[in-house]
Amino acid sequence: MSCRIEDYGLIGDMQSAALVGRDGSIDWLCLPRFDSGACFAGLLGDDENGHWRLAPQRGGMATRRQYRGDTLVLETEWETPGGMVRVIDFMPPRHQAPDVVRIVEGVRGRVRMSSVLRLRLDYGRSKPWVRRIDGQYVGVAGPDALWLRSDVPQHGRDFATVADFSVAAGERVGFVLTWHPSHLPAPDPVDADDALAETERFWTEWVSRSTYRGEWRDAVVRSLVVLKALTYEPTGGIVAAPTTSLPEDIGGVRNWDYRFCWLRDATMTLLALLSAGYVEEASAWREWLLRAIAGSPSDLQIMYGVGGERRLVESELDWLAGYEESRPVRIGNAAAEQFQLDVYGEVISCLATAREAGMAPQVHAWRMQTKLLDFLEGAWRRPDEGLWEVRGPQQHFTHSKVMAWVAFDRMARSAGDGQFGGPVDRWIAIRDEIHREVCQRGYDPDRNTFTQAYESPHLDAATLMIPQLGFLPATDKRVVGTIEAVQRELCVDGFVLRYRPDRTEDGLPGDEGAFLACSFWLATDLAMIGRVGEARALFERLLDLRNDLGLLAEEYDPRLGRQVGNMPQAFSHVPLVNTAVGLSAAAGPTPVGQAVRPRPPGRRASAGPR
């Protein structure tokens, strides 16, 4: 049986990542990319679907574990009757090929250890042909080959490669597993200790570049390290999570593949990187974004592959039982084909934020944005699937319309500042029209709250973004009313649900946990309306939900007291950073953006909507 979701730690090389359980088992690893087929898929099935357990022979959960300083080098320790042992896990920055390095270190006494490597390619379906070549073990299946080098003898047992050995205080035993295309010669050998030193240097130097000096430094830095680890280094794209099908509802069907790059995360991710001084990473993310969206505005997708791929065909892997029998296990994501109006606002807001932060403006990017706005001028009135990618009927989601407003507002502001030209008066007129419509049709005056969709009685936590986007000031009674309505109707044990699944036609049975990003949004909103003590208390509670390594999944289920959803989740760690930045600032939280009434050259500015 797999560990609890929060019992996993992350290691990665910025092209792929592995999840390491508290029991010393690597139960998830896709090579050579985040979205490649898994060679360890035990996380979504059982040991026969692939894993690598390296632990004391008596087994059991580790006594303690931690990351080495601010790095992504994981240390797991066991206290046993015979002594104490430490396993050091990491993936070094990639050179020729991806490597997983595991070092067993004797700390005290002598401990009997066991390594069980069960390779299963193609998400646990394919057993490779394993043979010994020049002292190494290589497993081959189709295009994939995995090479194992170790300081101790290995042998085959029950379709696994096994080593039984002991380690005494001061002794070290190294293992290196390397993926390589099966048609190529063996990859160059990797020295485990040299790779460890290089990996430590890399992460220590990277973290040293951070300019963050606010409160909660450890939580912020760990979140930034996670964000860096989820970045596909060759292109700059950032995956939402390194996993697929970890359930939002244990035993249910709300299981999705998150190994792709979502446009919805664009502005918040850019802000998180820039707020900590990571301009290079922010620039790489912007460039990935521009490449991914290139083409006809009508073809804009909500998500892309790490290289900008558009075809993310969804399918089900029926040979996997699912995490704690949460079926189906899905790869690919059909939501890529949905129409989500908000992504146009996300893209334009992200690029505007980049310009305002001092990143060099680009003429071709501006031209692309004007084309997006030309399309949006006719499309903003259409219903869509919304931010939460419902698989029910399209609706006129309030948040989607607000993001359409953001698109026209940010473009008018940039043009009004004289950076670029454009039909500013028309953009302002459309912006104002959207604003009036949202306030008329997306707001319930009887309950004093914005609703999930036009003329809907239901609530949606996405409306918490209204003051952060500058659509209305935080002091507006409609904003305060919305915040309080969310607290009354969408909070469970103080944490925020995206919406009530039993009241929203999202096309799926079952329930889900509290969405952590929404809970961070609530903390920011509370601070913006002057309830700073309440905001800080909620933020501290959210930090307490992190596992012992500082990691967060997508959601938290208050009923079970467990993290649920894909792990670790960028869309949880990014708002953690942004909320910490805001709460740490002496003047209060920094919103995601702010409405500005642009003044076109030679013209009097529009009064703007109220």
Image (tube, helix red, strand yellow):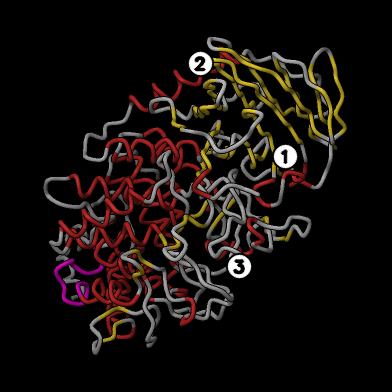
Mark 2 or mark 1: which is in front? 2
The kind of residue on which mark 1 rests is Cys
Which is nearer the eye, 12 or 103? 103
The reply to whether residue 314 is in sight is yes
Closer to the camera: disc 3 or disc 1?
3
Q: Nearer the viewer, residue 103 or 33?
A: 103
Q: First in sequence: mark 2 or mark 1?
A: 1
Q: How many residues crowd mark 3 within 10 Å: few (<14), some (14–19), many (20+)? A: many
Tell me the residue that label 1 is attached to: 39
Q: Which residues are magenta?
A: 470-480
**Mark 2 element type:** strand
Residue position marked by numbered label 3 in the rendering? 252
Q: Nearer the viewer, residue 434 or 373?
A: 434
Amino acid under label 2? Answer: Arg
Q: Nearer the viewer, residue 433 or 308?
A: 308
Can residue 186 be found in the magenta stretch?
A: no
Label pair 3/1, CB-CB below 8 angstroms: no
Q: Is residue 127 left or right of residue 213?
A: right
| x then y, percent, for residue 147 | 75, 24
Q: What amino acid is labelled 3 in the image?
A: Gly
Q: In screen coordinates, is 311 left or right of 483? A: right
Judged from this view, the residue extending furthest toward the top is 170
Q: Position of residue 544 (x, y in %)?
A: 34, 49
Q: CA distance from mark 3 to mark 1?
A: 25 Å
